[in-house]
């Protein structure tokens, strides 16, 4: 027999988790960070969490976990949790127009894509995508972290002109592992004939800014010079990344050829045709707003390792919102309204600029 207090506690924690995923319980400071970490799985993979919870409840129910008064209460709470997870899943499925309508307004109706190779359902495709498409790992720069995975369909001709995506991982500028970030995105693009290059880069606190952006630009320079060897088109390179990767991809897209961040390769082509930052940081100089004070402390103490009061220009130069100009490539900016790490208003301000 299952222990009833444990079953009830588990049900309550599940309800809190689902509620937080649907509507964050905190939106700033350290509580906001906790809310983000705790609600991340349920908000990003509600369907998977829901199905896992149902299967777990069936298994535990067969062992008597939901018998008695406390067990029935736990089952009722669990049912409410399922309803909330179902709502989150339905909400995520209904977001497609928000992605398609802005693109349709700019580039016209979507044409049917090359279906590529047969695809598994979502979760299976994600689990197997790297094994299927990532056959090459290269070193794009002199540092230990400068490794890049190249994702491509095996049937792509080496003398082709496939579109290319450079994927920059996130991690608060203190993590930067190219694996396992953006597997669904890169798998979907590889299915459709793209070549994706997922990079690692130097991170803080071991490495001080601007090592991070220098590495991203070094990777872009490598792609421009070598991607044709893999069947990619060096004249069609887009860039994307989430969180810190959203910041770095935006900054790289807005500063092609900037010599301060291209030491030793000042003349290299680091331009891109488009940028798709996802919940990025675009402002490294503002102290006002949710989570801004904590963000600025991290920049001063761990990443830039300089005081804003003494070296404000370093922070301003590293802010994509301050680098927007008439020659900026097209941007497609994505940001969730329930983000508790980076307030959605930062993305809106960036687009408005």
Image (cartoon, rainbow, N blue to C red):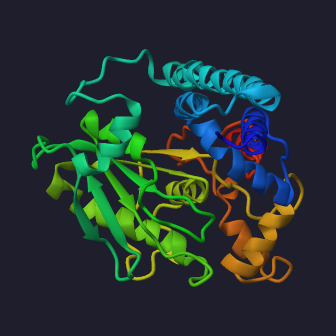
Residue 246 visible from this viewpoint: yes
Residue 88 image point, x, y percent: 66, 26
**Front position in the image: 123 or 288:** 123
Quarter occupied by the N terminus:
top right
Q: Is residue 321 left or right of residue 152?
A: right
Residue 206: quarter of image: bottom right
Where is 203 relative to 246, above or below?
Answer: below
Quarter occupied by the C terminus:
top right
Which residue is depicted at the point 25% across and 51% down? 131
Q: Is residue 121 left or right of residue 84?
A: left
Residue 309 image point, x, y percent: 86, 79
Q: Is residue 263 left or right of residue 81?
A: left
Residue 294 image point, x, y percent: 82, 66
**Front position in the image: 76 or 20:** 76
Residue 218: quarter of image: bottom left
Tell which residue pokes out farthest to the top in this image: 109
Residue 268 visible from this viewpoint: no
Which residue is depicted at the point 33% across and 64% down? 148
Tell which residue pokes out farthest to the right in this image: 288
Residue 21 image point, x, y percent: 72, 37
Tally the marks.
0
Tell which residue pokes out farthest to the front in this image: 1
**Front position in the image: 7 or 231:** 7
Which residue is depicted at the point 46% across and 53% down? 181
Where is 338 relative to 75, above or below?
Answer: below
Q: Is residue 320 left or right of residue 211?
A: right
């Amino acid at each position: 027999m299952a222990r009833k207090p444990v079953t009830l506690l588990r049900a309550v924690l599940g309800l809190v988790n689902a509620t937080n995923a649907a509507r964050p319980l905190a939106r700033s400071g350290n509580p906001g960070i906790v809310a983000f970490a705790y609600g991340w799985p349920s908000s990003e993979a509600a369907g998977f969490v829901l199905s896992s919870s149902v299967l777990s409840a069936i298994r535990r129910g067969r062992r008597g976990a939901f018998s008695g008064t406390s067990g029935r209460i736990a089952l009722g709470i669990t049912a409410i949790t399922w309803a909330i997870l179902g709502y989150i899943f339905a909400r995520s499925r209904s977001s497609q127009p928000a992605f398609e309508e802005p693109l349709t307004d700019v580039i016209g109706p979507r044409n049917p894509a090359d279906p590529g190779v047969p695809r598994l359902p979502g979760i299976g495709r994600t689990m197997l995508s790297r094994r299927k498409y990532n056959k090459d790992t290269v070193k794009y720069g002199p540092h230990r972290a400068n490794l890049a995975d190249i994702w491509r369909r095996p049937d792509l001709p080496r003398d082709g002109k496939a579109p290319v995506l450079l994927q920059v991982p996130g991690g608060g500028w203190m993590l930067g592992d190219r694996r396992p970030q953006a597997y669904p995105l890169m798998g979907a693009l590889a299915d459709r004939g793209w070549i994706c290059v997922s990079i690692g880069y130097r991170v803080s606190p071991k490495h001080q800014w601007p090592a991070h952006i220098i590495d991203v630009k070094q990777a872009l320079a490598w792609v421009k010079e070598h991607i044709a060897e893999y069947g990619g088109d060096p004249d069609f390179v887009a860039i994307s990344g989430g969180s810190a990767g959203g910041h770095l991809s935006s900054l790289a897209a807005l500063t092609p050829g900037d010599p301060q961040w291209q030491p030793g390769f000042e003349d290299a082509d680091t331009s891109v045709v488009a940028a798709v930052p996802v919940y990025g940081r675009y402002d490294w100089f503002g102290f006002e707003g949710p989570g801004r004070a904590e963000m600025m402390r991290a920049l001063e103490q761990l990443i830039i390792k300089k005081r804003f009061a003494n070296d404000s220009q370093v922070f301003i130069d590293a802010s994509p919102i301050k680098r927007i100009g008439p020659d900026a490539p097209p941007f497609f900016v994505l940001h969730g309204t329930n983000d508790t790490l980076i307030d959605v208003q930062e993305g809106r301000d960036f687009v408005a600029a």
